[in-house]
């Protein structure tokens, strides 16, 4: 099948930039040269999936192999799904727009339970049978991975294989076997048998659930005892992995729109509710010097204005203070901030806060999890109230105005006093700041027991109990300076069902999906009634999945080994009941969880550096691509000084026409940074770059004549070379045509010429009717409201250069309503929505009112 021609389709959907595939640093390989083709699927919208670090790592690892090709796809929003089904077109990859069914492997991330129906949307739009048993050698191999791989039974039958644990080594081993199987034409069964021999790989077809006559779960039967047990795959040392690739830079806005840099993996703090801490052990830190070098290089490669240092507990990274100082010494002159998304109270020092706020104050979030010291002892969250108040007081003193606190309710042994302590603690946090000038956001959610944790057998609150806790908190809030937010208990209910569910739920996922369940992690799409109706039709009691599991009761994930000994989990549960602490094994003695062999698998922790922290990284420590960053330093214009102004004209074609005005602005700002242009910034509390764009172009319109003005701190010595350098930093569809010194002032009145290709034959009488009329009224939609507008004063001329091509000259004046070229064409030619979607508009030029 040829690639999917989706240009006309994308003009019919919201935020079409999600599907353009024109990110900077995207990898496009020749399709015909690849011996193995992989497409990575993230089962949620683009703005969520593009924020996922794991997918980017695997994408680049596979593409580093010359004989392999890796591309991406994300779950489509409802509008694109409907358009694809209406047009009878398959879901396609971003890079080459090949149908997913043409790939050899479809790799699906399983990040959270409420994305399960999105997996089915991807499979069905790809034209693949939903169940693995219905697929054969002519279909791609569907493999899964991610956090939900450790409790996958509700969706296990949709997958051929599932990887538990780290993918950097295991995935490459799996793909090597798939390539051999493809070239040797192995049967599906032989291929799956070979994959099951790889440590960490689970093949659901080789296991079968057992039930009694009452449909009660009795355990999992191993159908292939000749194969090794399924045990989590662990990457022993992150520093063995080369990460020389350049990160993808989205052209459209995403949830975490920043440069993500992993500094460590694993957490041994031992919070007893936390599945991530169990399934990511042991702690493996990355070399701080390598992190520093990589971060500086990637800032230049991407142009991001924020760096996020990622780990489950960033403050526990041994060299965090030294690293943070060196990063900020190099990045603050470039107006690049650093955020620490996963900070633990007690590790966040005033010195670290001072470093973070040197550029701009990123979000400040603390996660006490429980309101009382007693309950924090139960969950092994060793944070004292004093530690928390010291951290909040330091943050307020350094200028933060808002602190976010995260809590759970419904934790084991919780009492009403513990719930009341949540509001009491939030009130004390507020009082650590200046009176009247500070705020606290209190975010709360129902505790969902997770497999492979000490609390895996605990009951979960019902929805009614959850709402009762929320109402209790609402009634006790002391003033409007504390804002309460909560996760919907209905969504927590369904998450709890799937977290500890078995294969009986496979039929439920499929039925709810057929009934319209999509994007359940989004509150505006989630409908619990749909799931309840599907469950009732299948005779499934959803509430039963939230009950307590007895100690002798088999669990649907017993056949999957996380690497942590079950006796350790049982001991931790008993310690919770007695409020006994288990210290962090990274700095104390081994906690005997059973994972490490201390030969291959062991903690990797770097010692504190003793070098001069104030010394910035040298050029030898930076990548060669990073050297141009020095030119951007000292970018704030002193008071009274004037920035060096330049006027830039650019074309916007092909995929770039599907980007919104603000997205184009962001694309250029990052391109300026990558090109090393010394941007000037405004004065004030939150300095912004001195860049001014022309009027917004209607989404979907191409142009040969757009312009912007920017201020620089230094003169560009070679304008033609600077233009060429900038063009190399722009994504597909954008190209700078001219660059010259110029003022910031923009004309108040412009005349623009548009060429519109239409899917109909134009009657000359239509244009004559428009031009001969003194008034021409059309209905346009603005901000969701239909408005009537006389467009005749805006039309300077209208003519036909071809039987299906219309040329419009339109006036545009600052402060006055405007009309879009397609709105004129639709009214003039009587186009329906399908015909409007098929039309193409090109802005040829713009002139001042003197024309």
Image (tube, rainbow, N blue to C red):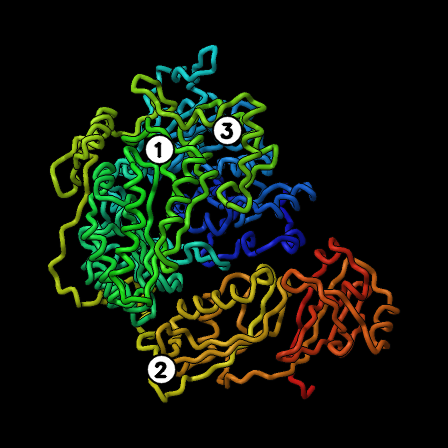
Kindly indicate whether the residue at mark 2 contacts the one at mark 1 (C-beta within 8 angstroms): no
Of 460 and 5, the residue lying toward us: 460
Report the Cα–Cα distance between label 1 and label 2.
54 Å
* Label 3: how many Cα within 10 Å (few below 14, some 14–19, many 20+): many
Q: Name the residue under label 3.
A: 158
- Indicate the secondary structure of the residue bearing disc 3: helix
Report the mark closest to the observer, 1 or 2: 1
CA gap, disc 3 and disc 2: 58 Å
Look at mark 2 in the image and give the residue it sits on.
637
Query: What residue did someone put label 1 on?
Result: 449
Left or right placement of residue 480 versus residue 781 in this view: left
- Counting from the top left corner in percent of width and height, residue 536 is at 56, 25
Q: Residue furthest top?
A: 213
The answer to whether residue 255 is above or below residue 157 is below
Residue 229 in the image: state x and y as whole percent: 32, 22
Left or right of residue 495, residue 822 in this image: right
Q: Which residue is drawn at 49% across and 32% down?
A: 142
* Residue in the foreground of this view, choosing between 285 and 48: 48
Q: Which of 497 and 151 is in front in this view?
A: 497
Could you tell whether 10 is left or right of 773 in the image? left
Rendering quarter of residue 122: top right
Give the SS element for disc 2: loop
Q: Which residue is drawn at 39% across and 59% down?
A: 480
Is disc 2 surrounded by few (<14), some (14 to 19) or many (20+) residues within 10 Å?
some
Dot 1: within a 10 Å radius of its alpha carbon, few (fewer than 14), some, or many (20 or more) residues? Answer: many
User: x, y (%) of residue 84?
Assistant: 65, 44
State whether residue 476 appears in this view.
yes
Within the image, what quadrant is residue 800 found in? bottom right
Helix, strand, or loop for circle 1? loop
Q: In this view, does 789 lie to the left or right of 64?
A: right
């Amino acid at each position: 099948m040829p690639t999917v021609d989706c240009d006309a389709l994308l003009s019919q959907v919201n935020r079409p930039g999600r599907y353009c595939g024109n990110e900077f640093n995207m990898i496009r390989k020749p399709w015909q040269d690849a011996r193995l083709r992989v497409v990575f699927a993230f089962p949620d919208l683009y703005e969520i999936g593009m924020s996922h670090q794991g997918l980017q790592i695997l994408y680049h690892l596979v593409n580093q192999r010359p004989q392999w090709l890796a591309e991406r796809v994300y779950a489509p929003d409802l509008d694109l799904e409907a358009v694809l089904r209406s047009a009878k077109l398959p879901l396609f990859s971003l890079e080459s727009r090949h149908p997913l069914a043409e790939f050899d492997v479809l790799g699906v991330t399983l990040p959270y339970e409420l994305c399960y129906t999105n997996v089915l949307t991807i499979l069905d739009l790809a034209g693949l049978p939903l169940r693995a048993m219905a697929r054969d050698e002519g279909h791609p191999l569907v493999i899964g991975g991610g956090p939900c791989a450790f409790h996958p039974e509700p969706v296990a039958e949709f997958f051929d294989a599932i990887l538990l644990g780290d993918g950097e080594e295991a995935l490459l081993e799996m793909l090597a076997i798939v390539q051999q199987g493809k070239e040797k034409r192995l049967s599906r069964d032989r291929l799956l048998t070979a994959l099951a021999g790889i440590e960490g790989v689970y093949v659901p077809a080789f296991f079968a659930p057992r039930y009694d006559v009452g449909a009660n779960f009795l355990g999992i039967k191993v159908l292939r005892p000749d194969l090794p047990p399924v045990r989590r795959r662990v990457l022993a040392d992150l520093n063995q992995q080369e990460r020389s690739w350049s990160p993808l830079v989205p052209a459209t806005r995403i949830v975490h729109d920043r440069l993500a840099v992993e500094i460590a993996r694993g957490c041994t703090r031992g919070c007893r509710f936390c599945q991530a801490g169990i399934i990511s052990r042991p702690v493996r830190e990355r070399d701080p010097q390598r992190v520093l070098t990589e971060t500086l290089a990637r800032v230049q490669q991407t142009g991001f204005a924020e760096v996020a240092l990622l780990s489950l507990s960033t403050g526990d990274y041994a060299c965090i203070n030294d690293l943070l100082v060196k990063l900020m010494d190099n990045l603050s002159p470039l107006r690049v901030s650093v955020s620490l998304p996963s900070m633990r109270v007690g590790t966040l020092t005033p010195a670290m806060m001072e470093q973070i706020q040197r550029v701009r104050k990123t979000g400040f979030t603390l996660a006490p999890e429980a309101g009382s010291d007693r309950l924090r002892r139960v969950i092994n969250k060793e944070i004292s109230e004093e530690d928390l108040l010291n951290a909040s007081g330091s943050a307020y003193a350094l200028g933060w105005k808002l602190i976010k606190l995260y809590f759970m309710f419904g934790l084991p042994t919780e009492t009403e006093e513990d719930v009341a302590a949540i509001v009491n603690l939030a009130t004390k946090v507020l009082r650590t700041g200046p009176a009247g000038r500070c705020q606290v956001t209190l975010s709360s959610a129902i505790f969902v027991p997770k497999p492979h944790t000490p609390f895996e057998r605990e009951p979960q609150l019902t929805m009614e109990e959850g709402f009762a806790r929320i109402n209790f908190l609402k009634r006790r809030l002391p003033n409007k300076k504390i804002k309460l937010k909560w996760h919907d208990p209905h969504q927590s209910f369904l998450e709890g069902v799937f977290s500890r569910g078995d294969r009986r739920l496979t039929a439920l996922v499929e039925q709810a999906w057929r009934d319209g369940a999509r994007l359940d992690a989004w509150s505006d799409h989630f409908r619990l009634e749909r799931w309840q109706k599907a469950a009732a039709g299948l005779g499934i009691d959803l509430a039963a999945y939230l009950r307590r599991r007895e100690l002798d009761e088999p669990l649907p994930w017993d056949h999957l080994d996380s690497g942590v000994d079950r006796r350790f989990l049982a001991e931790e549960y008993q310690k919770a009941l007695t409020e006994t602490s288990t210290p962090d094994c990274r700095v104390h003695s081994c906690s005997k969880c059973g994972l490490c062999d201390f030969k291959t698998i062991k903690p990797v922790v770097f010692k504190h550096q003793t070098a001069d922290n104030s010394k910035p990284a040298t050029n030898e420590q930076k990548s060669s691509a990073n050297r141009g960053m020095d030119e951007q330093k000292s970018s704030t214009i002193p008071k009274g000084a004037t920035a060096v102004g330049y006027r830039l004209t650019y074309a916007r074609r092909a995929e770039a026409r599907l980007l919104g005005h603000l997205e184009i602005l962001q694309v250029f700002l990052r391109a300026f940074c990558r090109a090393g242009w010394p941007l000037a910034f405004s004065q004030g509390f939150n300095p912004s770059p001195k860049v001014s764009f022309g009027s917004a172009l209607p989404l979907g319109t191409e142009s040969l004549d757009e312009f912007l003005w920017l201020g620089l701190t230094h003169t560009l010595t070679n304008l033609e070379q600077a233009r060429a350098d900038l063009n190399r930093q722009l994504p597909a569809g954008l190209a700078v045509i001219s660059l010259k010194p110029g003022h910031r002032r923009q004309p108040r009145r412009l005349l623009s010429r548009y060429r519109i290709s239409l899917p109909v034959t134009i009657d000359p009488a239509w244009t004559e009717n428009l031009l001969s009329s003194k008034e021409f009224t059309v209905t346009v939609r603005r901000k969701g409201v239909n408005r009537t507008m006389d467009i005749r004063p805006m039309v300077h001329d209208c003519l036909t250069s071809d039987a299906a091509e219309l040329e419009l000259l339109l006036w545009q004046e600052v402060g006055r309503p405007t009309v879009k070229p397609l709105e004129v064409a639709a009214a003039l030619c009587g186009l329906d929505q399908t015909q409007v979607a098929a039309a193409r508009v090109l802005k040829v030029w713009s002139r001042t009112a003197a024309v």
